[in-house]
Amino acid sequence: MRPIVISIAGFDPSGGAGILADIKTFEQIGVTGFGVCSAITYQREDFFDNLEWLPWKKIKKQLDILLEKHQVEYCKIGIIKNTKTLKKTCRYLNKKDIKIIYDPVVSSSTGFEFNSDPESIQKTLDKIYLLTPNKIEYRLISGKKKITSSKHYNILLKGGHNKKNKGVDKLYENKKKTTLFPRKGNHYPKHGSGCILSSAITAYLALGNDLKTACIKGKEYTADVLKSNSGLLGYHHSNVDSFYSITKKNKNIFSNVDYKIQYISQGDIPEEHLQNIKRALDSGCKWIQLRLKDSNRNSIKSTAKVAIKLCKKHNAIFILNDHVGIAKEIKAHGVHLGKQDMHPSDARKILGKKTIIGGTANTWEDIERLIAAKVNYIGLGPFRFTNTKKNLSPILGLKGYREIMDKMKNEKKPIPVFAIGGIVENDIYDLLKTDISGIAVSGLITKSKNPEQLIHNIKNLFHHAEVSFI
């Protein structure tokens, strides 16, 4: 069952900020979001006319009904009438052991001033778990020019408005400071970006991430929204379209941790493959490869049609192993081609520029061949012996990965590489040290008694490894 989080915020009819933006964010990240209205605003993405505040009694009534039945651990607070209302809200939530993420919105991106007395908020900060101000908001609230850590609460100082270090955020936690750098590339100003960031962090905390990891993931999610289009209203998605746009340039497509784990289907019959694919998707896997090697064309096609529907329902990438013609017919997101399958250049002519094409490599010569064919990613392996594949290539092991990945660095070959073949959870940390971009696994997920926890653990490993994702 999904964890539940609450947003206490204003209703923005444009959907770019406030409750609607928070709920969109919660849903995409994978938590159940409740919305408690603190104000009704009259605005669009580029203009703010006015608002009507809801008094504490009405906020409390909304909370009472929800919390009478549901357990909630985290709540994000956005605009709220005044410090008195904020204090009552925080006291109420504290009594129920709900941690508060407070986005102190002093003014909107359209210039409307919300809180006329931000300095008085200081007295309420010890009731808050995380404060997410920009530099102007922090100075108004704290009365300090210099950012200092607090033993009572954590601070994520947002850098979106900084002229010198634009987009560089700083997390102050337990008297430690962590700098979070922005992802490179084009990003466009968005109405409600602060709301999206704080609600994304709230969602990732509810999913069990520590604060640093939640902030990193929240920043990544927000970056996807910022780059989604050039307008003021961003798109929320997990994000197949941005995957395509990045793979076309053969850049590191795995800044989003969801694309660092590829599940390769297993099963004795097509129905088992589909059962295992659904189980992987339900557990949080966002990239599926259907690998049916001993079935006829009709069976592969019908199974692939069902699999792609499951993936679309979960907003996941679907690729088909081999069978380029079927992939084109059913409009799969891509194909993976083994060393004995169709040449990637020929597949590209059939499938077009936007289709994801991956290829299998075992040697440096294989890597060079696939790069020349302009594949989007490489599956490098096997790491160790596996009985899921016939005619297994020589085992690489950690030594083999180090040698090939070091050569890729020296030769400056910027293409994502997936480790594949007999990988178990304890291998992943050491594999990450070789600078692979992700892993492709089959039995690890299929045989897991708790695949949801497993996938969560793997994603955390990627975040904590010495690899820069932002």
Image: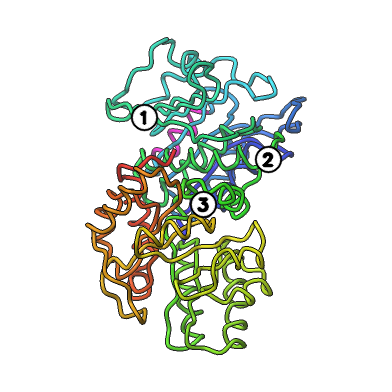
Label 1 sits on a secondary structure element that is strand
Q: Nearer the viewer, residue 267 or 390?
A: 390
Label 3 sits on a secondary structure element that is helix
Q: Is residue 193 left or right of residue 119?
A: right
Could you tell me how far apart the alpha carbons at marks 1 and 3 are, in whole angstroms? Answer: 22 Å
Q: Main secondary structure of the magenta part?
A: helix
Of badges 2 and 1, the one in the foreground is 2
User: For the residue carrying disc 3, how many other residues have a C-alpha within 10 Å: few (<14), some (14-19), or many (20+)?
Assistant: many
Q: Is residue 446 left or right of residue 354?
A: left
User: What is the x, y in percent for residue 168?
Assistant: 46, 26
Q: Which mark is residue 170?
A: none
Q: Nearer the viewer, residue 64 or 168?
A: 168
Q: Is residue 447 visible?
A: yes
Look at the picture and state if 13 lies above or below 23: above
What residue type is disc 2 on?
Answer: Asn
What residue type is disc 3 on?
Answer: Ile
Q: Which mark is residue 154?
A: 1
First in sequence, mark 3 or 2: give its number.
Answer: 3
Q: Which residue is the site of mark 3?
A: 29
Q: Quadrant of residue 232?
A: top right
Of badges 3 and 2, the one in the foreground is 2
Q: Quadrant of residue 21?
A: top right
Label 2 sits on a secondary structure element that is loop
Q: Which residue is the site of mark 2?
A: 229
| Discs 1, 3 touching: Cβ within 8 Å | no
| Discs 2, 1 touching: Cβ within 8 Å | no
Look at the picture and state if 154 lies above or below 268: above
